[in-house]
Image (spheres, rainbow, N blue to C red):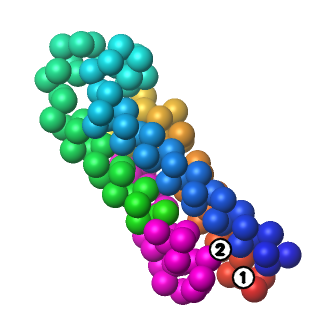
Protein backbone atom coordinates (compact mmCIF):
# COMPACT_ATOMS: atom_id res chain seq x y z
CA UNK A 1 0.00 0.00 0.00
CA UNK A 2 2.75 2.45 0.89
CA UNK A 3 4.60 1.78 -2.35
CA UNK A 4 1.44 2.71 -4.30
CA UNK A 5 1.26 6.15 -2.68
CA UNK A 6 5.01 6.62 -2.99
CA UNK A 7 4.74 5.83 -6.70
CA UNK A 8 1.82 8.22 -7.08
CA UNK A 9 3.81 10.94 -5.33
CA UNK A 10 6.75 10.55 -7.69
CA UNK A 11 4.48 10.34 -10.73
CA UNK A 12 2.41 13.43 -9.89
CA UNK A 13 5.54 15.39 -8.92
CA UNK A 14 7.16 14.45 -12.24
CA UNK A 15 4.05 15.44 -14.19
CA UNK A 16 3.91 18.77 -12.34
CA UNK A 17 7.57 19.39 -13.21
CA UNK A 18 7.02 18.57 -16.89
CA UNK A 19 3.97 20.83 -17.01
CA UNK A 20 5.97 23.71 -15.53
CA UNK A 21 8.73 23.21 -18.11
CA UNK A 22 6.00 23.55 -20.76
CA UNK A 23 4.71 26.72 -19.08
CA UNK A 24 8.31 28.02 -19.10
CA UNK A 25 8.51 27.35 -22.82
CA UNK A 26 5.24 29.19 -23.47
CA UNK A 27 6.06 32.21 -21.33
CA UNK A 28 9.77 32.61 -21.98
CA UNK A 29 10.36 31.25 -25.47
CA UNK A 30 7.06 31.31 -27.38
CA UNK A 31 5.23 34.18 -25.71
CA UNK A 32 4.46 36.17 -28.85
CA UNK A 33 3.32 33.26 -31.04
CA UNK A 34 -0.37 33.22 -32.00
CA UNK A 35 -1.07 29.91 -30.22
CA UNK A 36 0.43 31.07 -26.91
CA UNK A 37 -1.27 34.46 -27.18
CA UNK A 38 -4.60 32.65 -27.61
CA UNK A 39 -3.81 30.37 -24.66
CA UNK A 40 -3.17 33.35 -22.41
CA UNK A 41 -5.88 35.53 -23.99
CA UNK A 42 -3.62 38.42 -24.96
CA UNK A 43 -3.37 40.45 -28.13
CA UNK A 44 -0.15 40.88 -30.07
CA UNK A 45 0.20 44.36 -28.57
CA UNK A 46 -0.34 43.09 -25.03
CA UNK A 47 2.14 40.25 -25.58
CA UNK A 48 4.75 42.68 -26.84
CA UNK A 49 4.18 45.02 -23.90
CA UNK A 50 4.37 42.17 -21.37
CA UNK A 51 7.17 40.18 -22.99
CA UNK A 52 9.72 40.99 -20.27
CA UNK A 53 7.32 40.03 -17.48
CA UNK A 54 6.32 36.78 -19.19
CA UNK A 55 9.98 35.91 -19.81
CA UNK A 56 10.76 36.38 -16.11
CA UNK A 57 7.65 34.49 -14.99
CA UNK A 58 8.55 31.61 -17.28
CA UNK A 59 11.86 31.21 -15.53
CA UNK A 60 10.12 31.07 -12.15
CA UNK A 61 8.15 28.13 -13.52
CA UNK A 62 11.33 26.51 -14.82
CA UNK A 63 13.00 26.84 -11.41
CA UNK A 64 9.98 25.23 -9.72
CA UNK A 65 10.21 22.38 -12.22
CA UNK A 66 13.93 21.95 -11.53
CA UNK A 67 13.43 21.91 -7.75
CA UNK A 68 10.69 19.32 -8.08
CA UNK A 69 12.53 17.21 -10.65
CA UNK A 70 15.72 17.15 -8.59
CA UNK A 71 13.59 16.25 -5.57
CA UNK A 72 12.12 13.29 -7.43
CA UNK A 73 15.58 12.15 -8.50
CA UNK A 74 16.99 12.39 -5.00
CA UNK A 75 13.88 10.84 -3.41
CA UNK A 76 14.47 7.69 -5.45
CA UNK A 77 17.70 7.18 -3.49
CA UNK A 78 17.18 9.00 -0.21
CA UNK A 79 13.67 9.88 0.94
CA UNK A 80 14.20 12.78 3.35
CA UNK A 81 16.16 15.27 1.19
CA UNK A 82 14.10 14.43 -1.87
CA UNK A 83 10.84 14.84 0.00
CA UNK A 84 11.94 18.28 1.20
CA UNK A 85 12.58 19.41 -2.37
CA UNK A 86 9.35 17.86 -3.64
CA UNK A 87 7.37 19.67 -0.94
CA UNK A 88 9.13 22.95 -1.72
CA UNK A 89 8.50 22.66 -5.44
CA UNK A 90 4.93 21.38 -5.33
CA UNK A 91 3.98 23.67 -2.46
CA UNK A 92 5.25 26.67 -4.41
CA UNK A 93 3.28 25.57 -7.48
CA UNK A 94 0.07 25.34 -5.45
CA UNK A 95 0.85 28.67 -3.78
CA UNK A 96 1.41 30.37 -7.13
CA UNK A 97 -1.93 29.03 -8.37
CA UNK A 98 -3.66 30.39 -5.27
CA UNK A 99 -2.10 33.81 -5.86
CA UNK A 100 -3.26 33.72 -9.48
CA UNK A 101 -6.86 33.05 -8.41
CA UNK A 102 -6.76 35.65 -5.63
CA UNK A 103 -5.68 38.28 -8.13
CA UNK A 104 -8.06 37.40 -10.97
CA UNK A 105 -10.98 34.97 -10.58
CA UNK A 106 -11.20 34.62 -14.38
CA UNK A 107 -7.91 32.69 -14.21
CA UNK A 108 -9.48 29.81 -12.25
CA UNK A 109 -9.05 27.34 -15.12
CA UNK A 110 -5.38 28.26 -15.59
CA UNK A 111 -4.75 27.99 -11.86
CA UNK A 112 -6.40 24.58 -11.74
CA UNK A 113 -4.23 23.34 -14.61
CA UNK A 114 -1.15 24.74 -12.90
CA UNK A 115 -1.95 23.23 -9.50
CA UNK A 116 -3.70 19.90 -10.11
CA UNK A 117 -0.65 17.62 -10.45
CA UNK A 118 1.09 19.47 -7.62
CA UNK A 119 -1.91 19.09 -5.28
CA UNK A 120 -2.28 15.41 -6.14
CA UNK A 121 1.44 14.92 -5.48
CA UNK A 122 1.20 16.59 -2.08
CA UNK A 123 -1.91 14.62 -1.14
CA UNK A 124 -0.36 11.30 -2.15
CA UNK A 125 2.81 12.21 -0.24
CA UNK A 126 0.73 12.95 2.86
CA UNK A 127 -1.15 9.66 2.56
CA UNK A 128 2.14 7.80 2.03
CA UNK A 129 3.57 9.40 5.18
CA UNK A 130 0.46 8.53 7.20
CA UNK A 131 0.32 4.87 6.16
CA UNK A 132 4.07 4.32 6.18
The crowd level at tag 2 (other Cα within 10 Å; few <14, some 14-19, many 20+) is some
Span highlighted in magenta in the image: 70-99
Confirm whether residue 74 shows in the render: yes
Image-based side of 4 in relation to 49, left or right: right
Give the residue at x 51% y 49%.
18
* Total count of labels: 2
Q: Residue at x 58, y 57 (%)?
A: 14
Looking at the picture, does residue 119 appear above or below residue 47?
below
Position of 1 relative to 103 (above/below): below
Residues at discs 1 and 2 in contact (Cβ within 8 Å): yes
Residue situated in front as seen by the camera: 124 or 86: 86
Horizontal side of 59 relative to 88 (left or right) equals: left
Task: Name the residue tied to disc 2.
Answer: 126
Q: Name the quadrant containing residue 46.
A: top left
Magenta highlight on residue 42: no
Which residue is more in the foreground, 76 or 125?
76
Indicate the quadrant containing the N terminus: top left, top right, bottom left or bottom right.
bottom right
| Placement of 52 over or under 130, stated as above or below | above
Percent x, y for residue 50?
Answer: 18, 28
- At which x and y percent is residue 7? 73, 67
Which mark, by number, is residue 12?
none
Identify the element where label 2 is drawn.
helix
> Residue sitting at 64 percent across and 72 percent down?
125
Residue 123 shows in this picture: no
> Mark 1 sits on what residue?
130
Kindly indicate the quadrant of the structure image that contains residue 4.
bottom right
Q: Give how far apart the Cα atoms at labels 1 and 2 are.
A: 6 Å
**Disc 1 packing (10 Å; few <14; some 14–19; many ≥20):** few
Quadrant (top left/top right/bottom left/bottom right) for the C terminus: bottom right
Q: Nearer the viewer, residue 99 or 48?
A: 48
Tell me which residue sits at (57%, 86%) in the image.
78
Tag 1 secondary structure = helix
Amino acid sequence: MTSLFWGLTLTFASLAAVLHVYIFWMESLAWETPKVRRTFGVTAEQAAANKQFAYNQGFYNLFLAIITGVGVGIACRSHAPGIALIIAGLGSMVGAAAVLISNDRSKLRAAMVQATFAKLGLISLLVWALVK
